[in-house]
Image (cartoon, helix red, strand yellow):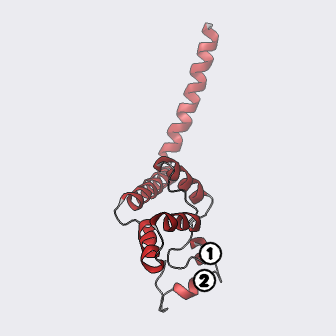
Amino acid sequence: MSVGSVAVARQTLGRWSLLAERLWRSYLVRRLLKALVTIYLVTTFTFFLVRLMPGNPIDVYVHGLIAEYGMTYEEARMQAAALFSIDLDTPLYVQYLSYLRNLLQGNLGNSLLSQAHDVGSLFTPGGGAEEYGPGSSRPCG
């Protein structure tokens, strides 16, 4: 490298450094970055908490199918996996990446209480939230 190219590289780096410093000093940018990090941490914590706790929602549903319909464990597990569009045999990190991708696309999955509705449709007008909202006899789910 020549001396001239090193000087140009330092000058370019200096400009980026100044820009980054100005952006970081911006209150709005700092708050936005903190909000994004907080959302990421909360969604990550929620994913692993639900998957790793005893009696996670999929296990509860599987045991309910076994008790109610007398299915074998494998049959109930396959039905739950098909209903909730989850491959229970994939490693946890693959499930996590799929979870993040679905969240970014707005796909919140199926409701555990009402398999006819996906969770995202419950938040849209006419999507079934009236059945589960305040004042109804049905719990949210």
Q: Nearer the viewer, residue 87 or 70?
A: 70
Per the image, label 2 sits on a secondary structure element best described as loop
Q: Amino acid at mark 2?
A: Gly
Q: Real-space Cα distance between discs 1 and 2?
A: 7 Å
Q: Along the horizontal axis of the image, is 126 left or right of 19? A: right
Q: Amino acid at mark 1?
A: Ser
Per the image, label 1 sits on a secondary structure element best described as helix
Q: Along the horizontal axis of the image, is 72 left or right of 84? A: left
- Above-or-below relation of 13 to 133: above
Q: Nearer the viewer, residue 112 or 28?
A: 112
Q: Quadrant of the N terminus?
A: top right
Residue 121: assigned label: 1
Residue 19 placement (x, y as % from top left):
56, 37
Residue 108: assigned label: none
Residue at the image position 50 percent from the left and 38 percent from the top: 21
Residue 89 placement (x, y as % from top left):
50, 52
Residue linked to disc 2? 128
When asked about the image quadrant of residue 87, the answer is bottom right
Residue 141 placement (x, y as % from top left):
49, 77
- Above-or-below relation of 27 to 111: above
Q: Farthest residue toward the left?
A: 54
Q: Nearer the viewer, residue 74 or 49?
A: 74
Badge 2 crowding class, 10 Å Cα cut-off, few under 14, some 14 to 19, many 20 or more, is some
Q: Are marks 1 and 2 in contact (CB under 8 Å)?
A: yes
Residue at the image position 42 percent from the left and 66 percent from the top: 59
Badge 1 crowding class, 10 Å Cα cut-off, few under 14, some 14 to 19, many 20 or more, is some
Give the number of marks.
Answer: 2
When asked about the image quadrant of residue 82, the answer is bottom right
Residue at the image position 46 percent from the left and 84 percent from the top: 139
Residue 135 placement (x, y as % from top left):
48, 92
Residue at the image position 47 percent from the left and 56 percent from the top: 35
Give the mark nearer the N terminus: 1 vs 2. 1
